[in-house]
Every structure is written in C-alpha cells, then in structure tokens.
Image (cartoon, grey):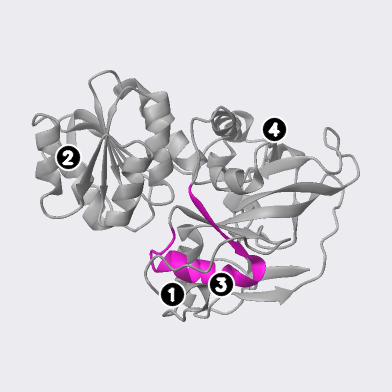
Amino acid sequence: MKALQYRTIGAAPEVVTVPDPEPGPGQVLLKVTAAGACHSDIAVMSQPAEHFRYALPLTLGHEGVGTVAALGAGVGGLAEGDGVAVYGPWGCGTCVKCAEGKENYCLRTEELGIRPPGLGAPGSMAEYLLVDDVRHLVPLGGLDPVAAVPLTDAGLTPYHAIKRALPKLVPGSSAVVIGTGGLGHVAIQLLRALTPARVIALDVSADKLRLAREVGAHETVPSDAQAAAAVRDLTGGLGSEVAFDFVGAQVTADLAATVVAVEGEISVVGIGGGAVPVGFGRLPFEVTVSSPYWGSRTELVEVLALARAGAVSVHTETFSLDEAPVAYQRLHDGRIDGRAVVLPHGQSPRTEVDPAGGRGPGTRARPFVG
C-alpha cells in the first residue's frame, strides 16, 4: 500500500510503498477514507535529531477515519464496511485515567511504550491503518469522512479545553480565542454552540480573521501591539473570563496573560513552546492556567454528535495521497484555509487555486524541516 512517511531527519515526508498490514487478535484494519494534516506533525518533523523521540520511518497522520476492512480474532461490535473515526490518544486501558475514559492522560504510556497513530505508531496517511483495539474507534453515524476527520483532533482538543472552562463562560462573559486557524475556527463555533459568552477572536492573518467572522466570532482583533488594549476596551476594562491560546508561542502566551480577567482562566492549547508565568503579582488575582491535551473518548462522541446536529463544521481543503507532501508544505506556510485533509483512495476534488497567489499545488515552497 501507499503511505506518507517521515523517513529522514531534516527531509520532507515521502509517499512510499509499504507492506499491507494484517490485523492480529483484538485488532481492526481500516481502509482509510480521510486523514487530517496537523501542525503537530510539522512540530515532529521540525525536531533536531538530538530531540527526536520516535522511530523512523514514521507513517504520519493522527487524525483518521475509515471503513472497517478486516477484523482480528475476538473483535466484536463491528462489521466490515462500518464507518468509524479513530480516537487518537491511545492508552493502556487499565490505569485510573483510562478507566475514566481519559486515555489522553494515560499514566502508563511511557512505561509501556504506547504511541498514538502518526505520533509514534503508524498513522492514517496511508491506504490502510491498523487500530490496536476496538475501544479506539467511534461510529461516524453518517458523517461525511472529510467533514469528520478533523474533528478527531481539531474538534476534540478545543472541545475538551472549552468544556472544562464552561463554569466561567456565563451570560455576560467574554472568551478570547488567540489563533483562528485549524483549531481556533472550530473553537469559535463550539463557544457559540455551548456558551452565551461574547467571542473575541485574535490573529495576525486578515484571512483567518475573516474566517473567524464567518464562523461566528462576535469581534475580531488583529493580534498586534494594540491587541490587549482592544480586548480591554471591548470588555469594559475587565478583560476576558477565559483566554484560549491556540498558538502557544511566547508572544501569544504573554498576550493571553495580558487580556485575562481577575479570577479568569488561561488555556494554552497550542504547542509553540511558550509559557505563562504563575505567581503572586504575575497575573491578575486567582487566574488559573492549564495546558490541556487532546480529549477523552466520550468527548469525541460528543463532538461528533454536535457535528451531526449541525452545530460545528470544519473548513477543509482536500488533497490526494500523492499530494500530501504539498499539503504539509502549504500548512507550514500558513496557506491552508482551516484544515488539510488527505484522501488516500481517491483524487482530490480541490481546484488548483493557491490563495496566496501562487500556482497551486505545483508551486515549489521552502522546506519546513531541517
């Protein structure tokens, strides 16, 4: 089968041919219908050799949906042809966190060497994906694969962050969303669907601010030197009850600390390497800071239910598997509107249009690794 693999430190990912996987006892083989590309993948591929923690070659893709192609011995509850979404943060299934359905916070992953698909284990950027246990699959329930696949991370991660902050997002409150790209534009929709809060979106890109307005942001603010003052002005000088940072760079973490209100919450979701200083006098009184990771299987079920109800959708741009390296390049360059989705078993219906004014998928861009 074909697969997109990161094979050499500092090199771009390649489409290669690898052996077809076969399910063992308890495993499920999926025919991948859609796979999502994410900035987390770029973060992995940008690591220098001394910090790289995975074995190479690595088949990319931690967002995946597919149809059941084959069942290993002992697997029940599924039939060939069933459409399913993959719950990505695999855990041991037996520790106290896994028993709560929170495999994203499994306590034994390092001890047992458990890795999520695409982030250590072979991922979904391939024609077939081997899933280790049926508990890591959630029925699609009729959702379109392209629409559903980003929800397994770009939907689940902001949903988890927002759900834990709901007690603060009461009538009259404000929520700041910093970074309105892949995860941020979904977060705006979730905030509108789940809370009465006033949503204030910040980004450096005019195109992403336009997208934020389209999906429901009440206010949009350029993320520049005047952003904090603008948020304070919009909130009557009080600041925002919750600030969600979907970038996670130091400059955005600093911005979140500047716009949060007394007794507010900062949620640093992005993995840009920034940090929020915590200590007396460093933040407004009684501000809490969290760094949530992915979400629980139950929360994925809830996100898919919201999508079926029409409460949330993801702007996507699709690519064939052969075009997947280009998808990652465009993602790295900030030239994807929403999320990039790879279709391993079909040609992309995407038109050859480059929103940045280039020549489309054939445009040669600078490398993003090395």
Q: Nearer the viewer, mark 3 or mark 2?
A: 3
> Front-most of 336 and 294?
336
Q: What residue type is labelled 1?
A: Phe
Q: Residue 325 carries which label?
A: 3
Mark 3 and mark 2: Cα distance apart in space: 38 Å
Residue in view at x 75 percent, y 41 percent = 83
Q: Residue 141 carries which label?
A: 4
Q: Which amino acid does label 3 sit on?
A: Pro
Residue 295 appears left or right of 334: right
Percent of width and height locating residue 358: 41, 75
Mark 3 and mark 1: Cα distance apart in space: 11 Å
**Neighbourhood count class around disc 4 (C-alpha, 10 Å): few under 14, some 14–19, many 20 upward:** few
SS for tag 2? helix
Residue 206 appears left or right of 194: left
Residues in magenta? Answer: 315-336
SS for tag 1? loop
- To which residue does mark 1 refer? 368
Residue 14 appears left or right of 246: right
Quadrant where the N terminus is found in the figure = bottom right
Percent of width and height locating residue 224: 16, 55
Q: Nearer the viewer, mark 1 or mark 4?
A: 4
> Front-most of 342 and 72?
342
